Image (cartoon, helix red, strand yellow):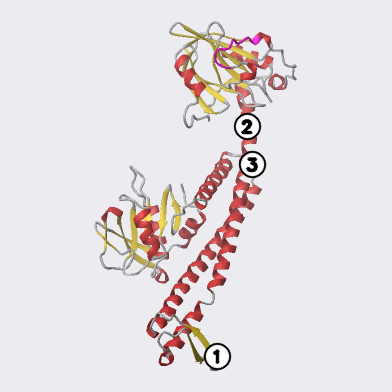
Amino acid sequence: MSLNWKEIDLIIKELSLPGAFIQKVRQPNFHSLLFDIYKPVSGRFPLLLELAPQQCRCNRLSHGTPYKTTGKLQRFAQLLRSRIQGGRITESYQLGSDRIILLTLQKNQVITHLYIRLWSNAANIIATDDDDCIIDAFYRRPKKNEISGKHFAPEVYNTPPKKEFSIRQTFYEQGEHPLDFNEFIELTYETKTAGRLFDDLHKEADKSIEAEIVRLERSISIKRKELDALESYEKKKHYGDLLATYRHMMEPHAKWVTLSDYANDNQEITIQLDEKMSPGENIEHYYRAYHKAKGAYERIFEEINHTEEQLIQLQREQEKIRNITDPSDQNISYVKRIIVRNQHIHRTSSEEKPIPGLRFSSRHYTILVGRTAKENDILLRKWTRGNDYWMHTRDYPGGYVFIKYIQGKSVPLETLLDAGNLALYYSKARNNGKADLYYTQVKYLRRAKDSKLGTVLPTNEKNLAIEFDQARLDALFTGDTDA
């Protein structure tokens, strides 16, 4: 729904722009411009030039603008800033009934014409010199000769078919009201734009949740296969026990040994050996394999449980999203948060070289967690810097937790508590429900010589007592911490 020529005429007359100054040129997106206008008598206001299909319009924004300039200023807006920003509008009118507004501006004795064409499928803003030679255009269209250096002759365009005066008629049919036509146009488009925006956001949020649900379901399926492959880890311990019991029957450099399985009615069982290992080393090999497989099984089992919890949370969230119909500011804000969060999760999950261990988000801070000595060591060596924070349980083995540093900011208490709960959860102190932790910056860690992989000695450390908080942990795993 774009403006027709009579509506444009009414808007231009109400604005009465001659004599006004353009204080600033802004570009909030790829299909609109904002001019900050100053009129000596009536004051300041933003003037919106909207070129999006079915939304073409030019009107004053009187309720404060929701448009914010983001990113690098585009080419045409940069030109206007240098050529007309600070300039004075000398003329403002519509060319006949062609829905083309002409603004003539003067800055430092230099004349610029702005032709603002509000055609729904061919909208454009064309800047020319005083001889109507094109300086540049919002949309460069070579086929229409709307490029730098060409002559612009708006009179050659045919007048578009007339339309029903729906917006203008509605305005007058309402009778007396406190709004002028610019305000009426602003509110009319705000309502329609908010509805379209919410519909688009609603679909995008549902799509992003569905994509994340599919990803989690795929992850659970893969982890279940890994779990199935590790289910026989108890067998490795049993083999180690049998070999320890019948050690005297193991011959050096043998590839196999056949024994009586006392746990299975003394049936004979043949166990493979490494001929390069001694009997004692073979026994130790099976015990190490048992502990490694047992640790992996328990870790993957926990990951499946947490992933299933995330899946349930997402399914509830999707149902909630689908039941939202009111495009209120609160609902729009909620839907946007869901989209941004899922985009962050998707980027994290699709990295070519994923960070080892686990990654969490807490109030704009990134938390990294190592679950094994190898992950702890790699995170410390390759993924952290001196100003990042390191956290670990006192007196209990466990994973290293790192809080990534944000320049100029101190880590808030809530983020410390989030990291502390993760340090407690991924440690041997978890069953106690509480633990004492210490934390310091990575630059105050010193590697311990001749010690196990990843062992460090901290200095300048601070203490933190943590009690297990399931709700806090759930929020971290579902990505639902406050921004």
Give the vertical position of 344 relative to 49 (above or below). below
Secondary structure of residue under mark 1: loop
Position of the N terminus by quadrant: top right
Give the vertical position of 287 relative to 65 (above or below). below
Give the vertical position of 75 relative to 101 (above or below). below
Question: Would you say residue 447 is visible in this rendering?
Answer: yes
Query: What numbered label is drawn on residue 309?
Result: none
- Residue pointed to by mark 1: 264
Left or right: 288 in relation to 328: left
Left or right: 396 in relation to 155: left
**Where residue 395 sits: x, y (%)?**
31, 69
Residue, x 66% and y 15% (percent of image)? Answer: 99
- Residue pointed to by mark 3: 326
Residue, x 47% and y 56% (percent of image)? Answer: 476
Left or right: 323 in relation to 237: right
Marks 3/1: CA distance? 66 Å
Q: Main secondary structure of the magenta part?
A: loop
Residue 274 located within the stretch drawn in magenta:
no
User: Which quarter of the figure has residue 463?
Assistant: bottom left
Secondary structure of residue under mark 3: loop
Give the vertical position of 379 relative to 428 (above or below). above
Q: Are marks 3 and 2 in contact (CB under 8 Å)?
A: no
Left or right: 209 in relation to 353: right
Q: Please rate how many residues cluster around mark 2, counting C-alpha atoms within 10 Å: few if below 14, some from 14 to 19, many from 20.
A: few
Magenta stretch? 147-154
**As shown in the figure, which amino acid type bears the numbered disc 2?**
Thr
Q: Are marks 3 and 1 in contact (CB under 8 Å)?
A: no
**As shown in the figure, which amino acid type bears the numbered disc 1?**
Asn
Query: What numbered label is drawn on residue 193?
Result: 2
**Where residue 256 sits: x, y (%)?**
48, 85
